[in-house]
């Protein structure tokens, strides 16, 4: 199979960047999309041209490293699938495929398709944890959790932190990412003690990082490779309001 | 040199407690005067970094990924073992210990394995307290499942994403310490050397992957948690970036490398489909609970399948060979990984393999679906079936899955004593990076257990024993040892760039992988290994004379990163071959065709090979020196493993 790849090339954060087109003649329908990128890079290196830089690691759809728009959609056309798990059988022979890095102010481009997503780490550092030191935990079965609650917390916890939600949103909002963690920990009994502070701090950090607000277009959830539910955002808003309504008063007393 | 494993004496069950009492402590107020470097942020590294920071040490943590959360522990599917006996089915610390020693084919240290089994229960408590959403029963308590090589249900799991949930738990504990200033995090930073002063580890040299800058970091102790070396094979279930560079550079600075030939080939992976393939994907071992493994009885049928003239579903029951059920009636499809893998290879070697390549066997759910209904099977394995369909385009509810073994885990690694310290004082190795707990074969759901045991519950105690004797003064990074190591690292990278040959890094890496897979993979012979030794020498020459890496070392350069790792894989591959040649027996994942029972099972030689092979680097292009640590078994009886 033959395809034309129209790839965003940008030397560094200060470079303006531009598209370049490359023909790949030896594609194969069993290949993953990133394997197609490997073939392209092998071809470029042989021609003495600089390969396309992109983040990738596990290639099993779980590490969250790979991040690119494929034909204008985060991680490409297949629902619930990361770029590394997308296979060429979903493309037509002779097709031109456009590949770009995430476009969001809070994810500055480093080079080609690589962006800086460290803002996500800082949001988690602001409160995405339960403060429990190693060794101080009670027996695991002393904290029963209803199965339905555990399952719902698990669903929120499957977020891989790839940033597709931000990339999909016209406001570059990080609400789906942030809410998934707030939701997971707010649902569980272990997360109750720090529940209010967590919501306030993580949301404050999200704002500091420059992510936009949510206008309920639902694009984030539609494009999320792990199909994280929009209900998490509703839950986060509720957490935030509850925190605002009560936490200051408690802290002051 | 006789290796001192510092293994405690006394009754097995008391050893860890007694040993902990004997370890020196660092006063809480003095802990803040010590800096510790942790390299790698997978389960072992993240849990160690968080726990050490909680104790009050200053931690610097390094990973090559853009975030600590992306380390490859994230991809572990099945679960984590712990001797909780919540199921009331007869589990105990001793049984977990026993199963692990037996599963490892009696090539691990009793004391280490027993400690692992003991602290396993604390790991589950810790993870639950962090908010890790393990699977639960309707009563709200934790659920368990069974796994290969065990006859009790002791595996805790979070759907097919246990590694992800545990890693995110450890990452959150780390994030809390980053926020409090006790951990300084260095993502996109790769360790390229360890710095020793008077023989002790005093820091590391790293490369900032974004700028190419070479930097020195000084500390009072260094912990390597950099994972295994499965990517020597090029194709493995490891992530693309997984590498052995940190461990290998430490080895060249004096850390012994133990049992490098002990590599685990996982039986249920999606088969290779072409030359462009970049990695292999595991399908959880849990599938073997309901899937039946088979190939056509005759070569003729198999050939027709390969040519596309015959479909699996059209092969009549009497023309199928359920070879695991036939050969191992009591364990059937649930034999341990090494046995399942070897048998898959054997039937393919006979010409009965399926898929276009002939390198695949069927894993069939037809009977399970008929028995339990599609809904039940979907509830158990839905996400795995979906993943399979995404990759192959086949629907496993309709046609049997095709699977083939692939490199998955490496039991070998840096030699460590009971305190997890390498032969370089002050340099520790934890998780898959060390060799200590799995012997010649690791049981399912034990990798997560070991990584977290080392990080949460072992290193925080044992490292204090070393630090208590260290002065608060740190060696400055202006010290000549740092400067010399920096210069060496820079020279090496510039040398790679300067070659400007004709072959890409991947081309050479694939050649290496092919040789190691064919001759030091699922089965090995003296003759094959000797050929491989020569071939790897040639590949090394090709690399240093003909590799092509564009750009410079002073910038972001992903090809250079790969090249630097492949150069180390080549040297490590050569050592794997030497180790496999030395070990004239078969055990666990190491199967030497010359040493097998009449039924074709692995034949151990306990009298002559009941030792850890710890290799000592002697200098460039010099043969490595073999040091032996004898393994003594006082609590288990060595038997021929039988799963018939």
Image (cartoon, rainbow, N blue to C red):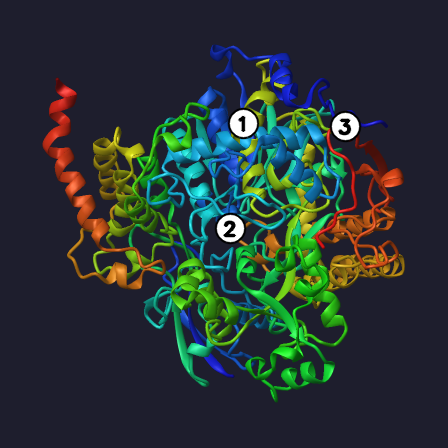
Where does the image place residue B581, in percent across and percent down from the top left? Answer: 86, 50
Secondary structure beneath disc 1?
helix
Picture quarter containing residue B560?
A: bottom right
Q: Closer to us: mark 2 or mark 1?
A: 2
Report the disc number at residue B536.
none
Image quadrant where one finds the N terminus of chain B: top right
Q: Foreground: B544 or B1?
A: B1
Q: Dot 2, how many residues are within 10 Å of its Cα: few (below 14), some (14-19), or many (20+)?
A: many
* Same chain? Circles 3 and 1: yes
- For the residues bearing labels 3 and 1, Cβ distance under 8 angstroms: no
Picture quarter containing residue B490?
A: top right
The answer to whether residue B608 is above or below residue A58 is above
Q: Is residue B564 visible?
A: no
The answer to whether residue B127 is above or below residue B264 is above
Image quadrant where one finds the C terminus of chain B: bottom right
Q: Is residue B579 visible?
A: yes
Q: Foreground: B518 or A169?
A: B518
* Same chain? Circles 2 and 3: yes
Q: Dot 1, how many residues are within 10 Å of its Cα: few (below 14), some (14-19), or many (20+)?
A: many
Residue under the point 38% across and 62% down: A101
- Mark 2 or 1, nearer chain start: 2
Secondary structure beneath disc 3?
loop
The answer to whether residue B27 is above or below residue B153 is above
Residue under the point 62% across and 28% down: B115
Which residue is labeled 1 in the image?
B457
- For the residues bearing labels 2 and 1, Cβ distance under 8 angstroms: no
Report the disc number at residue B634.
3
Q: Dot 3, how many residues are within 10 Å of its Cα: few (below 14), some (14-19), or many (20+)?
A: few
Residue under the point 65% across and 79% down: B318
Where does the image place residue A182, in percent across and percent down from the top left? Answer: 27, 41
Q: Is residue B598 left or right of residue A210?
A: right
Report the disc number at residue B78.
2
């Amino acid at each position: 199979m033959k395809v034309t790849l129209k790839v965003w090339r940008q030397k560094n954060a200060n470079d303006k960047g531009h598209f370049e087109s490359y023909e790949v003649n030896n594609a194969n329908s069993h290949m993953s999309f990133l394997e197609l990128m490997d073939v392209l890079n092998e071809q470029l290196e042989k021609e003495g041209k600089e390969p396309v830089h992109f983040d990738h690691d596990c290639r099993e759809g779980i590490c969250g490293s790979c991040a690119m728009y494929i034909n204008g959609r985060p991680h490409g056309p297949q629902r619930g699938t990361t770029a590394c798990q997308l296979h060429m059988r979903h493309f037509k022979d002779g097709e031109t495929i456009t590949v770009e890095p995430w476009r969001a102010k809070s994810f500055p481009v480093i080079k080609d398709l690589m962006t800086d997503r460290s803002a996500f780490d800082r949001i988690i550092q602001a409160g995405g944890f339960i403060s429990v030191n190693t060794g101080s935990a009670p027996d695991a079965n002393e904290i029963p959790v209803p199965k339905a609650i555990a399952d719902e917390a698990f669903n929120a916890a499957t977020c891989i932190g790839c940033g597709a939600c931000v990339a999909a949103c016209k406001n570059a909002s990080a609400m789906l990412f942030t809410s998934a963690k707030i939701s997971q920990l707010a649902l569980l009994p272990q997360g109750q003690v720090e529940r209010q502070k967590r919501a306030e701090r993580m949301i404050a950090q999200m704002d500091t990082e420059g992510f936009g607000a949510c206008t309920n277009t639902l694009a984030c959830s539609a494009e999320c490779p792990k199909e994280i539910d929009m209900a998490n955002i509703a839950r986060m808003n509720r957490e935030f309001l509850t925190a605002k309504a009560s936490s200051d008063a408690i802290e002051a007393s | 040199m006789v290796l001192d494993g510092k293994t405690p004496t006394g009754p097995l069950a008391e050893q860890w407690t007694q040993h902990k009492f004997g370890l020196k402590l660092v006063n809480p107020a003095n802990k803040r005067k010590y800096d510790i470097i942790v390299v790698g942020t997978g389960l072992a590294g993240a849990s160690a970094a968080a726990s050490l920071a909680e104790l009050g040490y200053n931690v610097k943590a390094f990973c090559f990924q853009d975030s600590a959360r992306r380390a490859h522990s994230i991809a572990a599917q099945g679960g984590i073992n712990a001797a909780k006996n919540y199921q009331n089915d007869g589990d105990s610390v001793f049984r977990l210990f026993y199963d692990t020693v037996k599963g490892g084919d009696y090539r691990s240290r009793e004391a280490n394995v027993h400690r692992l089994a003991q602290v396993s229960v604390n790991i589950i408590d810790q993870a639950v307290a962090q908010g890790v959403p393990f699977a639960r029963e309707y009563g709200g308590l934790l659920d368990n499942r069974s796994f290969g090589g065990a006859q009790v249900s002791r595996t805790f799991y979070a759907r097919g994403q246990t590694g992800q949930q545990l890693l995110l738990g450890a990452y959150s504990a780390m994030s809390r310490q980053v926020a409090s200033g006790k951990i300084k995090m260095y993502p996109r930073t790769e360790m390229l050397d360890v710095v020793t002063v008077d023989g002790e580890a005093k820091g590391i040299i790293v490369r900032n992957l974004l700028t190419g800058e070479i930097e020195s970091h000084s500390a009072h102790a260094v912990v390597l948690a950099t994972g295994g070396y499965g990517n020597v094979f090029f194709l493995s279930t490891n992530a693309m970036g997984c590498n052995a560079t940190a461990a290998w550079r430490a080895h060249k600075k004096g850390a012994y490398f133990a049992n490098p030939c002990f590599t685990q080939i996982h039986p249920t992976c999606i088969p290779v489909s072409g030359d462009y393939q970049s990695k292999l994907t595991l399908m959880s071992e849990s599938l073997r609970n309901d899937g039946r493994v088979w190939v056509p009885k005759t070569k003729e049928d198999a050939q027709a399948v390969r040519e596309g003239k015959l479909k699996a579903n059209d092969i009549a029951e009497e023309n199928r060979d359920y070879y695991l059920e036939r050969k191992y009636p009591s364990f059937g499809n649930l034999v341990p990984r090494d046995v399942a893998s070897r048998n898959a290879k054997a039937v393919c070697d006979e010409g009965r393999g399926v898929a276009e390549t002939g390198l695949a066997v069927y894993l069939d759910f037809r009977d399970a679906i008929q028995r339990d209904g599609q809904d039940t099977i979907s509830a158990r394995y839905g996400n795995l079936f979906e993943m399979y369909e995404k990759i192959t385009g086949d629907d496993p509810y309709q046609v049997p899955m095709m699977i083939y073994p692939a490199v998955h885990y490496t039991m070998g690694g840096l030699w460590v004593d009971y305190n997890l310290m390498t032969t370089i004082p002050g340099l520790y190795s934890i998780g898959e990076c060390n060799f200590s707990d799995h012997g010649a074969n690791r049981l399912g759901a034990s990798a997560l257990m070991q990584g977290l045991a080392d990080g949460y519950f072992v290193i925080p105690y044992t490292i204090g024993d070393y630090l208590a004797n260290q002065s608060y003064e740190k060696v400055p990074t202006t010290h000549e040892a740092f400067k010399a190591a920096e210069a060496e690292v820079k020279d090496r990278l510039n040398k790679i760039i300067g070659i400007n040959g004709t072959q890409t890094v991947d081309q050479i890496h694939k050649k290496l992988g092919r040789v190691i897979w064919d001759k030091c993979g699922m089965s090995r012979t003296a003759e094959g290994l000797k050929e491989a030794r020569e071939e790897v020498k040639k590949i090394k020459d090709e690399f240093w004379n003909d590799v092509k890496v564009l750009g410079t070392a002073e910038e972001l350069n992903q090809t250079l990163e790969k090249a630097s790792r492949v150069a180390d894989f080549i040297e490590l591959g050569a050592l794997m071959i030497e180790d496999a040649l030395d070990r004239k027996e078969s055990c666990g994942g190491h199967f030497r065709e010359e040493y097998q029972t009449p039924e074709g099972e692995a034949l151990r030689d306990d009298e002559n090979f009941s030792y850890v092979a710890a290799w000592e680097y002697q200098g460039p292009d010099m043969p490595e020196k073999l040091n032996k640590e004898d393994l003594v078994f006082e609590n288990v009886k060595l038997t021929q493993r039988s799963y018939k």
